[in-house]
Structure formats: structure tokens, C-alpha cells
Amino acid sequence: MRASARHGGLFAIDFEVGSVIPLFHDFTDETVLVFGGGPVGARKARRFAEEADVVVVSPAFADVEFGGAELVREVPDAEDVGGWFDRTDPALVVAATDDGALNEAIAVAADERGVLVNQTDRSGERDVDSVVVPATVEDGPVTMAVSTDGTSPAVSKYLRERFEEEFAGVGEMAELTADLRQDLRDEGMGPAERRAAVRRVVKSDRVWKALDSGRSNPSQVVSAVISNNTGDSS
């Protein structure tokens, strides 16, 4: 499992009841296998299609976008689920059919093979290790995510929308401070002083407003904030 700043999927793994750990995983050159061609399966396919090879197995497909995933029209059953694992060698499998027993069989097959599984019709206590795919907001190199462990998609959506509203421009701030850290390092500033300077910039309302206003070069504001230990005082 590799961390990735730009080419990764964010999810939480439930290792045991009540223990959910958020992780980044790089799906480059990996396969995500989705069982279920309804709106939920389509949404999951779109989520991973930009980062992985996605195969969706279903007897029928909703009239929605699947993100360019490979669609295989076949009726899967509990007996032949394992064959799909063998053929596709997935890094992650999504059980998103409308058949609870089939979803459970998919999850068990994944657990037996040590494959991560996202079972979309289950939340809370689980019988096998599983993955929760959170609601995410992406802005440049920054990814923010929230999950209620599947208990309240409405809350996840609400918080995602608040993130989008409250942290508009966070990607620009991340890129700005990455360049700033390198510039200060090149100038010979020590690590402690450099960290303090970058923190002042991140906390500065003046810098955020400069980014939000669309100024082509907020460097003058950044320089003023760094030279002023109180950050935003005038």
C-alpha cells in the first residue's frame, strides 16, 4: 500500500468492530471490481475510474455514466464470484448489487483472498474486514474527506458541501506554501523559524483574502505576513 498525494483513493478500513482507520491508496495500474450496475455501482465506478482500471459486472446497467469503466453484462451468482476475482485480480471489490445474499458472498470471497471490499448495503458492525469510501473534496494537491461509517450519507454530503464552501482556495494555499518552504530553505532559514513562518502564512486572513480576490501575485502579502510576527495585525 503506497501513499499518494495526487493519484490516490481515500478510504477508511474497518479492521475490527469500531476501529476505522482512514488511508490513502494509490490505485495506479490496479483493478477495482464492481458487482452491480445500478446507480450505486455507477457512482462507485466513477469514483475510481480516473485512478484505476474498473470492471463492472451486472446483468443490466442504469442509464447513467460509469466513468469509462469496462461493463460486463453477466448475471453473477455466489458460485462464480471467485472466478471474477481470479480473472481480474482486483485491489478492491465493491459489492453493490440489490441482492443482499450475493453481496455477502462477494464480501466473504474477498475476505478469503485478502482483498479489500466495500459492501454498500452494510454499515456499522461487519463480519469481514471492509472499506468505507468517504465523501471527498479535492482542490489541487489537497484532499479532504468525511465518513459516518455508512450510517448517514446525508451528514457526509452536508459536511462535504461545507468543506467546499469554507475551504475554497485551499489548493492554492497548499501550492503557495510549498513554494514558500523551498524559498525559505534556499535562503538559509532554519527549520524552526521556517515552520513558524509558514504557519503564520497559513493562518493569515490577509493571505487567504489575497488568494480569494484572484490577485495574480500574493507574494507581497506573504512577505508582509512573514516579516510581521503577529501575522494579521496592521
Image (cartoon, helix red, strand yellow):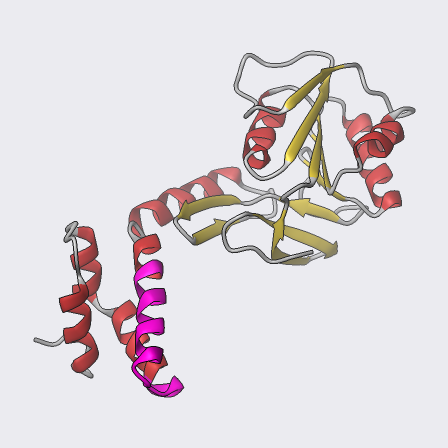
Q: Residue at x 59, y 14 (%)?
A: 62
Q: What type of secondary structure mainly makes up the magenta span?
A: helix
Q: Position of residue 163 (x, y in %)?
A: 37, 49
Q: Position of residue 165 (x, y in %)?
A: 30, 46
Q: Residue at x 83, y 28 (%)?
A: 84
Q: Position of residue 25 (x, y in %)?
A: 63, 51
Above or below 53: residue 24: below
Quarter-wise, where is residue 194 in the image?
bottom left
Give left or right: position of 84 versus 201. right
Task: Name the quarter where the N terminus is drawn.
Answer: bottom right
Q: Nearer the viewer, residue 125 or 25?
A: 25
Residue 183 is a magenta residue? yes
Above or below 89: residue 97: above
Q: Which residues are magenta?
A: 175-193
Give left or right: position of 57 versus 137. right
Give left or right: position of 147 versus 86. left
Residue 43 is a magenta residue? no
Q: Nearer the viewer, residue 109 or 191?
A: 191
